[in-house]
Amino acid sequence: MSYPEHVQYPEVRYHGTRGEVNASFRPAESPPDLSSPGATTRYLATGESTGGEFGLYEVELGPRSAGAETHFHKTMSESFYVLSGELELYDGEKWTTGRAGDFLYVPVGGLHAFRNVTDEPMSMLMIFSPGAPREEYFERVAEMAQRGGEELKQFRIRHDSYFLEDFEPGAP
């Protein structure tokens, strides 16, 4: 494959000449950072730990787990990489069954949703770019969903999650 001459890397951000010892390692046997009925989440790389570059989360959804209804983000893209099992992914137009190795990229502003409709658990990687403080959202969304109404809507907006159901009752 040939690459055009005009392809450029981003602006240099590290100006040292020898590199640094600054990598972080998370062993596979590390316990989940968040466990709730039907789901676990591991904070592999948070927006804070990557200096805002990206956030990477491993999410395991139990059988028949609701996931998230149709929504979009105004400040970040979101990507899904299916590790195991099956995940229904909505790309703004249609639902598709994602299986191990399948990937969905959702640009900023892109409508999307996901759910596990099978009787088996599934796991995936979720990537947010740039990295945002998603941890509070993950940790409190179930509590806020129980409260519902305007409080839930404002919580979602504060976390850059614009759900169609908050603005268009009956939306897909």
Image (cartoon, helix red, strand yellow):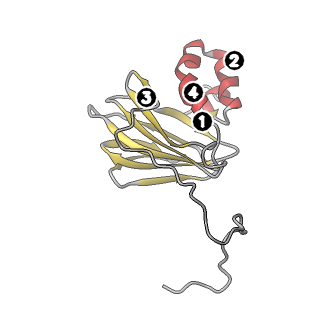
Q: Which residue is mark 1?
A: 134
Q: Residue 121: x and y, percent?
A: 30, 34
Earlier-in-chain disc, 3 versus 1: 3
Spatial CA distance of label 1 from label 2 is: 20 Å
Spatial CA distance of label 3 from label 4 is: 17 Å
Where disc 1 sits, the SS reads loop
Q: Residue 14 is drawn in which quadrant?
A: bottom right
Q: Which residue is mark 3?
A: 66
Outermost top residue: 147
Q: Is the residue marked by circle 3 packed among few (<14), some (14-19), or many (20+) residues within 10 Å?
A: some
Up/down of 19 relative to 111, above or below: below
Q: Tell me the residue at 53%/54% (across/down).
A: 23
Q: Residue 32: x and y, percent?
A: 42, 32
Amino acid identity at mark 3 = Ala
Earlier-in-chain disc, 2 versus 3: 3
Where disc 4 sits, the SS reads loop
Amino acid identity at mark 1 = Arg
Q: Which residue is mark 2?
A: 150
Earlier-in-chain disc, 3 versus 4: 3
Q: Residue 87: x and y, percent?
A: 37, 42
Earlier-in-chain disc, 4 versus 2: 2
Q: Residue 170 is drawn in which quadrant?
A: top right
Spatial CA distance of label 2 from label 3 is: 21 Å
Amino acid identity at mark 4 = Gly
Up/down of 106 relative to 141, above or below: below
Q: Are marks 3 and 4 in contact (CB under 8 Å)?
A: no
Residue 48: mark:
none
Residue 170: mark:
4
Q: 172 or 146, which is in the foreground?
A: 146
